[in-house]
Image (spheres, rainbow, N blue to C red):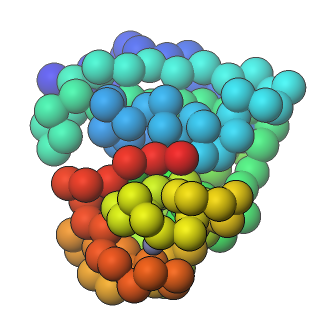
């Protein structure tokens, strides 16, 4: 049950709250957004109760606002994430992530012989199914789907 009087992770004054991250993908979100490399104050909670997801995670990044393109990169690991832009302790704006048309980096091509797995070439995919997230490699044209997905 949600208890409005009690936040699992303290409120922030300014910044971005990313809510409804599947708990198992929290650290992928952190790595995709490069949160391990910035000096901002970051707080997170994981394995929090959530009706929809079973167990969810939440990340709060103080004094940081993301570009759309940047945030959509997390869609493959957190398709139902909700962003809250916080200004002066208030939720100024809410955003949902969208699965982008193309994915660069992040995911590994399923084909072991693909040039992106053999040489130092950044993987690049066309998203051919946004709902189930299925990716077609630009180089070898093999399809990588959700179950086979490994992350760079
Ligand atoms: N939040 C925060 N700091 C603030 C204001 C809000 O960290 N100063 C967080 C809340 O903890 C919550 C999220 O931002 O996780 C969204 O806040 P709010 O819209 O007030 O909560 P809900 O109505 O529960 O939002 P939703 O149902 O859209 O998830
Ligand atoms: Zn490939």
Q: Is residue 137 among what the camera can see?
A: yes
User: Which residue does the image show at 30% across and 76% down from the upper left?
Assistant: 143
Q: Is residue 76 among what the camera can see?
A: no
Query: Camera-side residue: 139 or 71?
Result: 139
Determine the image quadrant of residue 11: top right
Left or right, 78 with respect to 34, comes to left
Q: Which quarter of the rendered image does ligand 2 occupy?
A: bottom left
127 up-or-down from 84: above or below: below
User: Which residue does the image show at 56% across and 69% down from the upper left?
Assistant: 115
- Residue 29 horizontal/vertical position (percent): 51, 41
Quadrant housing the N terminus: top left
User: Which residue does the image show at 55% across and 17% down from the upper left?
Assistant: 10
38 up-or-down from 138: above or below: above
User: Which residue does the image show at 25% across and 55% down from the upper left?
Assistant: 148
Query: Camera-side residue: 33 or 57?
Result: 33
- Residue 87 horizontal/vertical position (percent): 73, 44
Query: Camera-side residue: 124 or 121?
Result: 121
Left or right, 112 with respect to 43, comes to left
């Amino acid at each position: 049950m949600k208890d409005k009087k009690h936040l699992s992770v303290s409120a922030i004054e300014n910044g971005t709250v990313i809510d409804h991250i599947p708990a198992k993908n929290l650290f992928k979100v952190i790595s995709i957004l490069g949160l391990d490399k910035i000096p901002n104050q970051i707080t997170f909670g994981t394995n929090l109760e959530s009706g929809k997801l079973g167990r969810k995670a939440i990340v709060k990044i103080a004094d940081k606002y993301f570009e759309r393109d940047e945030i959509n990169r997390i869609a493959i690991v957190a398709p139902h994430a909700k962003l809250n832009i916080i200004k002066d302790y208030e939720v100024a704006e809410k955003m949902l992530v969208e699965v982008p048309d193309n994915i660069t980096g992040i995911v590994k091509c399923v084909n072991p012989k693909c040039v992106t797995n053999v040489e130092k070439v950044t993987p690049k995919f066309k998203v051919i199914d946004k709902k189930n997230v299925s990716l077609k490699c630009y180089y070898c044209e093999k399809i990588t789907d959700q179950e086979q997905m490994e992350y760079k």
